[in-house]
Amino acid sequence: MSRLKGLTDLLQDAVDRGTVAIQQVHSEIASRPFDLLQQVPPLDAPARAVRRIHDVVVARTYTSIRLVNQLVHVAADAAIDAVTARRREETER
């Protein structure tokens, strides 16, 4: 079961690192049109406002993904521990 726990640790870490990397790319790509719009004086203020909203939504979305990933990892570890304990009990009988 320790191999299974190692696998769940590896998977959780991969999802966390993957979402961080994807969030960075997402933010970099999204910044390009905002940068251009902010160079047009009448569009500067609205573009800044929309950019702020966009950035908050993106940050919260990726944070939520990482939080759910962490919760799934905790649940998987608890399930593995329960199965391990049950097997131990059965073999002790």
Image: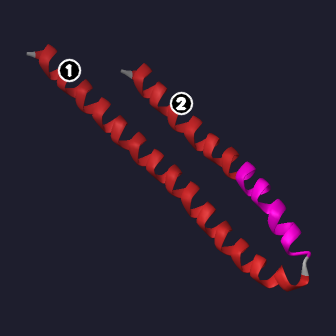
> Relative to 51, does residue 86 appear above or below in the rendering?
above
In depth, the one of 52 and 10 nearer the eye is: 52
Looking at the image, residue 77 sits to the left or right of residue 54; the answer is left
Where does the image place residue 70, in percent across and percent down from the top left?
46, 46
Q: Residue furthest left?
A: 93
- Pointer 2 local density, CA inside 10 Å: few below 14, some 14–19, many at least 20: few
Image quadrant occupied by the N terminus: top left
Residue 30 among those drawn in magenta: yes
In depth, the one of 74 and 93 nearer the eye is: 74
Image quadrant occupied by the C terminus: top left
Helix, strand or loop at mark 1: helix
> Relative to 67, does residue 3 appear above or below in the rendering?
above
The quadrant where residue 13 appears = top right
Looking at the image, residue 57 sits to the left or right of residue 26; the answer is left
Residue under the image location 74 percent in, 49 percent down: 25
What mark, if any, has residue 23 been given in the picture? none
- What amino acid is at disc 1? Arg
Give the mark nearer the N terminus: 1 vs 2: 2
Question: How far apart in space, not on screen, are marks 1 and 2 (Cα)?
Answer: 25 Å
Find disc 1 in the rendering and name its residue: 88
In depth, the one of 80 and 23 nearer the eye is: 23
**Which color scheme is applied?**
secondary structure
> Relative to 25, does residue 83 appear above or below in the rendering?
above
Residue 38 among those drawn in magenta: yes
Q: Specify the principal SS of the magenta part.
A: helix
Find disc 2 in the rendering and name its residue: 10
Q: What's drawn in magenta, residue-wise? A: 24-39
- What amino acid is at disc 2? Leu
Where does the image place residue 9, in percent across and percent down from the top left?
49, 33
Residue under the image location 91 percent in, 75 percent down: 39
> Relative to 50, does residue 42 appear above or below in the rendering?
below
